[in-house]
C-alpha cells in the first residue's frame, strides 16, 4: 500500500468519526442542556528516509464542545432552571462531581434537589441543596438563592471550569473538570430550561458535506486500486 492510500485512509477515518459526531448532534436537537460537539482535523507530518519528501496525513483525534447559549423554553416549573450567560450547575454523581446546563430539577423524598436520574444539585460550597417541604412558596433568585415564604434557605451554585480547554465530555449534558472549578457569574432563571444549542440546519448541511467528501475519498481509493491492479497485470503479462 503506497503513501497516497495511507493518507486517504486516515482522512476517511476522520470523516467517519465526524459523521458519527454530527449524527449524534442531530439526534440530540431536542435534548435539554445538550452541548453540540465538533471534530478538529489536524495535520500529522512524518519525515521519510533518504531524500524523499515528508508524508502528511490528516488526523481527527480532538473533539470540541460548543458552549454557545441555547434557546430558553418557559415551563413555569418551580425547580426548572436555566443559566443565562456563562456557568454550569454542578451535580454529585456516583462518578464524582459533574458540570451540566440541564436544569430540570426536583426535590427528592429527603428534600434534596436532584436531577431526573437522582444526582444531587450542589451549592456554591459543594454541599447538596436542601429544599424544605411545606415551607411555603419557593422562589429562586438570579444568583441562585432559594427563598421559602420570603426567607432564604439555600443557594444553587454556578460554576465554570478553571481551564475551559480541560472540560471533558462524559455525555451530551455532563462534563468533568479535571482542573477544578471556579465560581461563575451567570444569571439563573426560574421556570425555564435551556434547549440544546445544536443548529439542526447547519448540522444537516455538514452531514451532507462530510458524506460527499467521504464518497470522494472512496472513489479515489477504488481508482488507485484499479491502477495498481492494472500495473501488476502489465508486469506479469
Image (cartoon, rainbow, N blue to C red):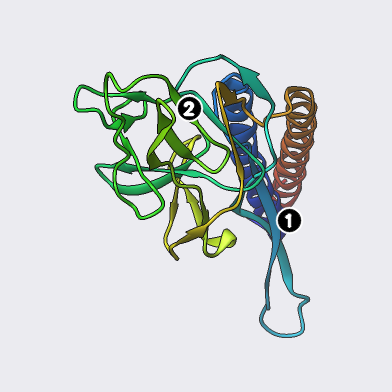
Is 60 situated above or below 23?
A: below
Farthest residue in the bottom direction?
Answer: 50
Residue 12, horizontal then vertical, whole percent: 66, 43
- The image quadrant that residue 120 belongs to is top left
Q: Can I make out residue 182 in this image?
A: yes
> Which residue is at the front of the view, 9 or 86?
86
> Which residue is at the front of the view, 46 or 78?
78
SS type, badge 2: strand
Image quarter of the N terminus? bottom right
> Which residue is at the front of the view, 152 or 95?
152
Which residue sits at x=43%, y=41%? 156
The tag earlier along the polypeptide, 2 or 1, is 1
* Rendered image: mark on residue 21: none
Residue on which the image places disc 1 = 4
- The image quadrant that residue 7 belongs to is bottom right
Residue 79, horizontal then vertical, whole percent: 44, 24
Q: Can I make out residue 103 in this image?
A: no
In the image: residue 92, left or right of residue 232: left
Q: How many marks?
A: 2
Residue 234, horizontal then vertical, whole percent: 76, 47
Q: Nearer the viewer, mark 2 or mark 1?
A: 2
Q: Answer few, some or many: residues within 10 Å of disc 2's Cα (few below 14, many 20 plus, some between 14 and 19).
A: some
In the image: residue 17, left or right of residue 149: right
* Rendered image: mark on residue 139: 2
State the separation of the CA atoms marked 2 and 1.
Answer: 64 Å
- The image quadrant that residue 61 belongs to is bottom right
Which residue sits at x=72%, y=41%? 221
Q: Answer few, some or many: residues within 10 Å of disc 1's Cα (few below 14, many 20 plus, some between 14 and 19).
A: some
Amino acid at each position: 500500500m503506497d503513501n497516497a492510500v495511507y493518507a486517504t485512509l486516515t482522512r476517511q477515518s476522520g470523516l467517519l468519526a465526524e459523521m458519527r459526531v454530527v449524527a449524534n448532534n442531530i439526534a440530540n436537537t431536542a435534548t435539554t442542556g445538550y452541548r453540540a460537539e465538533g471534530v478538529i482535523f489536524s495535520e500529522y507530518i512524518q519525515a521519510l528516509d533518504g531524500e524523499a519528501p515528508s508524508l502528511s496525513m490528516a488526523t481527527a483525534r480532538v473533539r470540541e464542545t460548543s458552549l454557545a447559549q441555547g434557546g430558553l423554553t418557559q415551563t413555569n416549573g418551580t425547580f426548572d432552571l436555566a443559566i443565562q450567560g456563562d456557568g454550569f450547575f454542578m451535580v454529585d454523581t456516583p462518578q464524582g462531581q459533574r458540570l451540566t446546563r440541564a436544569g430540570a430539577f426536583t426535590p427528592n423524598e429527603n428534600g434534596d434537589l436532584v436531577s431526573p436520574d437522582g444526582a444531587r444539585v450542589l451549592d456554591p460550597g459543594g454541599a447538596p441543596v436542601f429544599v424544605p417541604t411545606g415551607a411555603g412558596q419557593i422562589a429562586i433568585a438570579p444568583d441562585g438563592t432559594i427563598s421559602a415564604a420570603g426567607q432564604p434557605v439555600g443557594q444553587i451554585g454556578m460554576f465554570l471550569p478553571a481551564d475551559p480547554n480541560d472540560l471533558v465530555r462524559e455525555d451530551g449534558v455532563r462534563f468533568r473538570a479535571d482542573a477544578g472549578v471556579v465560581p461563575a457569574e451567570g444569571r439563573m432563571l426560574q421556570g425555564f430550561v435551556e434547549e440544546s444549542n445544536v443548529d439542526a440546519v447547519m448540522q444537516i448541511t455538514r452531514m451532507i458535506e462530510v458524506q460527499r467528501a467521504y464518497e470522494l475519498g472512496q472513489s479515489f481509493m477504488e481508482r488507485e486500486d484499479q491502477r495498481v491492479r492494472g500495473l501488476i497485470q502489465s508486469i506479469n503479462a
